[in-house]
Amino acid sequence: MSGKKYFVLMENGDDTSQVFVNNQPRGAALKAARRGITDIQLRERGTNRVHCFDGWRDLVAKGAGGPAYLPDKIWKANVKKTGIKRL
């Protein structure tokens, strides 16, 4: 079993068409934050849980070992979990 979970992004209490796949809710939230979403609510499919995060991203210089095709500045995502709601 792969352990992958599906997290549906919610806006204003309703599901959107965006689904993030990851083992942990934090990984899915980082994917959403990288796209510029700040108020992140992810509903875990198959459960009654909604994982809530605050997200932000910073424009930083790429690392010394970064591949040549990356631009000099990249977006680095960060999230902080604010809680879990039950539906």
Image (cartoon, helix red, strand yellow):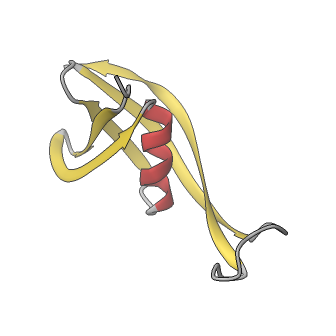
**Residue 78 image point, x, y percent:** 60, 48
Q: Is residue 35 left or right of residue 13?
A: right
Q: Quadrant of residue 41?
A: top left
Q: Quadrant of residue 9?
A: top left
Residue at 64% x, 78% y is: 70
Of residues 76 and 63, which is closer to you in this image? 63
Residue reaching furthest to the right: 64
Looking at the image, residue 76 lies above or below residue 41: below
Of residues 83 and 63, which is closer to you in this image? 63
**Residue 86 image point, x, y percent:** 25, 17
**Residue 50 image point, x, y percent:** 30, 27
Looking at the image, residue 24 lies above or below residue 19: above
Looking at the image, residue 82 lies above or below residue 38: above
Of residues 53 and 27, which is closer to you in this image? 27
The C terminus lies in quadrant: top left
**Residue 61 image point, x, y percent:** 77, 72
Looking at the image, residue 69 lies above or below residue 12: below
Residue at 44% x, 63% y is: 35
Q: Is residue 66 left or right of residue 84?
A: right
Residue at 49% x, 40% y is: 27
The N terminus lies in quadrant: top left
